[in-house]
Image (cartoon, rainbow, N blue to C red):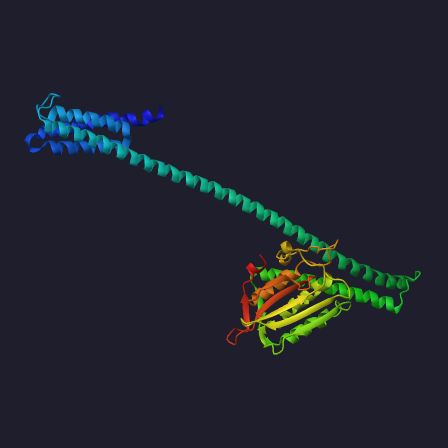
Amino acid sequence: MKRSAQTWPGYILGAAAIALATVLLKLLGAQINSTTVALGMLLIVLFTATRWGSLPALFTSLLAMLCFNFFFLPPFKTFSIASTDNWVALAAFLITAITAGQLSARAQRRAEEAEAGRQEIERLYKELRDVFERASHAEALQQSEKLKSALLDAVTHDLRTPLASIKASITTLLDEIRTVNAGDLPITLDRDSRVEMMEIIDEESDRLNRFISGLIDLARIEAGEMRLRRNWGAIDEIITASLDRARPLTREHKVEVKLETGLPLVRVDDRAVSEVVYTLIDNAVKYSSPGSRVRISASQGDDRMIRMSVADEGFGIPLDLRERVFDKFYRATRGGQTTVPSGTGMGLAIAKGIVEAHGGKIWIESNEAGRGISVVFTLPIGDDEEESHETINLVESVS
């Protein structure tokens, strides 16, 4: 019913057009021939087929054939045909009109189907885009929640624990002074106890300072505002500075350093690179047993890059977690461990940002002995033409 409602104007307008053409062509009389009449009516059939489809075009073709026969083929005003040539002309006109009408109608249908297909594809594309945007938004929210949870856990542990130690120590020291001033039974602390409490306050204050510095470094990395102060320096001096700082951590481990002979100077921010090495040593100690070895090595590659690594003999990291350990605030137990060692989960994220800021890469490899892992990173040797102070965009480094 819907199709008929759409095409019925085609029947009326097709018939009206044939009638009008017949009148106009008849008025021209001897100035036209049968070929001109046939072409004129054929155009009407084609237009009808293009606009309203095959059935109105077929109807228009039959009506045009009757008008062509009745008014323009002798004997006129009769449906009989005297000459065989006119029979051929009439048949050719009818076949041509029907065929052209059908082809034109089919082309119109194909165009309509193509347009409908295009609209359907656009609709599906919009639906898929909406679904993808919703999924991306949900994923972003989920990641945001995980990040907030990890940040809250880190802040809760790494702020509250040192604050509790500082509070307990300072309270005890103050209580001793207050009882003496009040004349009450004094709380007596020997010199070693006082020194121990002051050392606790000092160590925990340093721990708070390191935590806050780590948060600031991460914020700078993500904002693309970390500044590298590049100077020419020696790899062995950078490693020595890291080991000196890490000496309290490595007392129960065997540290081995293996440097390739003749390493060139590198143009880096030695303080930042030393922080990377220290972080990797800290992790190696945390995730390996006392008495095990921590091996630090450096060599030069063929691509003007220095390759450095810190290897441990610890529990190892599963392959599917080796990329995640560089995420912010991510901490995972290694094979055989039941608890996560203390830490904020910021160290490797900061190390990755520093290495990539220098134009290097950092990754994790399995040790040849099959025990523990090696954290490997590369640094470019550098160029005299580089600026000594650079602002590096590190947004992609830890995102």
| The C terminus - image quarter | bottom right
Q: Nearer the viewer, residue 219 or 113?
A: 113
Q: Position of residue 387 (x, y in %)?
A: 52, 73
Residue 89 falls in image quadrant: top left
**Image spot of residue 263 (x, y percent):** 60, 76
Number of marks: 0
In the figure, 295 relative to 329: above or below?
Answer: below
Residue 284: in sight, yes or no?
yes
Name above or below for residue 130 compared with residue 228. above
Furthest-bottom residue in view?
A: 262
Locate residue 358: give its quadrant.
bottom right
Q: Position of residue 277 (x, y in %)?
A: 66, 68
Q: Which quadrant of the rendered structure holds the N terminus?
A: top left
Which one is in front, 371 or 364? 371
Q: Residue at x 60, y 69 (%)?
A: 307
Considering depth in this image, is 83 or 47 the residue closer to the camera?
83
Indicate the position of residue 298 as horizontal and vertical percent values.
Answer: 63, 72
Residue at the right extreme of this rendering: 185
Q: Which residue is most to the left?
A: 30
Splitting the image into 4 quarters, where does residue 271 fall? bottom right
Tell me: residue 254, above or below residue 113.
below
Q: Is residue 157 found left or right of 230 in the rendered image?
A: right
Q: Is residue 265 left or right of residue 58?
A: right
**Residue at 83% in and 60% down:** 171
Instruction: State the residue at coordinates (12%, 33%).
Output: 35
Q: Is residue 289 left or right of residue 118?
A: right
Q: Nearer the viewer, residue 30 or 130?
A: 30
The reply to whether residue 50 is visible in this rendering is no
